[in-house]
Image (cartoon, grey):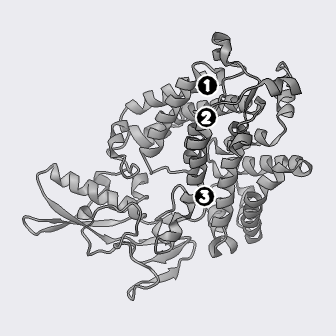
Amino acid sequence: MIKKLSQPIENAPLIVFRIFFGLIFLFESVGSLLTGWATNNYANVKTNFTFIGFEWLSFLNSEIIYGVFAVMALLSIRIILGANYRISIIGLFILWGMVYLGQKTSYNNHYYLMWLITFLMCWVPANAYASVDCKKNPAIYSLTAPRWSIYIFPTMIAIVYFYATIAKLYPDWLQAVVTRDMFVAMDKPDFLKPLFHNHTFHYFIAYMGILFDGLIIPALLFRKTRVIAIIASLIFHIFNSVTLQIGVFPYFALAFCIFFFPPETIRAFFLRKKTPLSEVSLKKSTSTNRAILTYIIIPFVALQVLLPLRHWLIPGDVLYTEEGHRLSWRMMLRSRRGEAVFKVKDIQTGEFERFDNSVLLTPKQRQRLNSPDVIWQMAQKIKEYYLEQGKNVEVYCIKSAVTINKTYHNQLIDPEVDLANEPWHWFTHESWILDPNSRPKGIRKVLKPHQHLK
């Protein structure tokens, strides 16, 4: 298998994807600056909920973030041009990784996907044609690329769609509860409201989502259904772009379609000046070092297959506990609301006081205080806040009611546990996350659309 995957093939799809990839990151970087995303999520915050273990990225919570996005924009341009490609793509991988890991307030699965694809782009010869690097160093010029460097991208997107399909097979999605809440809450023109409030429409969107995620890759793989799949992709992703307003992701997803066409088709459409490959020239082409495939790409794919399965090894419902939720392609699956209330005990005096979350958090950050990992991180931040004042405290989450798809859960976190002194366990269940189905004092009821969590 390794030998076959290392064989050279036409590299047109990889070259074109490099250009699309650079354009998408350019729009993402510039858009984050112009729309205020960088300001609201980094520059104008006192603290941030980083991924656990990446608290050192707190230095991004300043005007430094503007420089980070400006550099990413410049690197994106150099990737488009194929100028110092290897340095540029590695730099983009590092900087985007910092941005992604540095905050969870505006978490999106497509940020993670973009980071993974950036990692893969570090290893492929995407600058072997139509690049500044080729002109400066003709030795890297090539009309071919190893087969794996083309196949890895549709493989990655297939993993994403597969797990996105499986994740939707649960009652609230199948009963159109999620899509109902999603579209009813949208702020759209009056003429669209009858459609967006129609429950038949909610069912249509729910099941079309399952069918699209589950069938799009097989449909793209077969020549007879490929054109239909492309049309369906255009409709699906443009609809999502307009209604859900999820940034560049719909166009990023569309860019992967080029890998499902024969390389000759991509060359004829996008790179008309590129010399066609003959059987003789293809046989003379040499493959790259197989060590990259063996020790980096194959383990990477295995990891992506296994990561979304980890929540099955952790007790509790992932929809409620969120243990194993991230990095698992559980996309747009539920609405989750609530804000935790913290009580602080001064160890020296024994006095209690309620902590005002607005002291440390923006209103948007406070809305994220409904996931166990974020609540645990907040307890650590509260403890640090008091330590700066010379006080040693215990921190209790006395109220952590959340609604998931408008189903009310009375208490998410054990109010008798001092979270500030609880270690974080990376691979096991946190005992202080309460089970909503087994607690005798639990209250579980369905909220009506007009009701709000108090």
Using the numbered discs, state the Cα–Cα distance from disc 1 to disc 2 in whole angstroms. 10 Å
Residue 250 percent coordinates (x, y)? 69, 45
Choose the circle earlier in sequence order: 2 or 3.
2
Q: Are marks 1 and 2 in contact (CB under 8 Å)?
A: yes
Disc 3 target residue: 331
* Whether residue 251 is situated above or below residue 328 in the rendered picture: above
Using a 10 Å C-alpha cutoff, classify the residue at mark 2 as few (fewer than 14 neighbours), some (14 to 19) or many (20 or more): many
Choose the circle earlier in sequence order: 1 or 2.
1
385 vs 65, left or right, is left
Using a 10 Å C-alpha cutoff, classify the residue at mark 3 as few (fewer than 14 neighbours), some (14 to 19) or many (20 or more): some
Using the numbered discs, state the Cα–Cα distance from disc 2 to disc 3 in whole angstroms. 24 Å
Disc 2 target residue: 121
Q: Amino acid at mark 3?
A: Met
Task: Looking at the picture, tell me which residue is in the foreground, 37 or 198.
Answer: 37
Q: Are marks 1 and 3 in contact (CB under 8 Å)?
A: no
Using a 10 Å C-alpha cutoff, classify the residue at mark 1 as few (fewer than 14 neighbours), some (14 to 19) or many (20 or more): many
**Which mark is nearer the camera, 2 or 3?**
2
Identify the mark at residue 79; answer none if there is no mark: 1
**Label 3: element kind:** loop
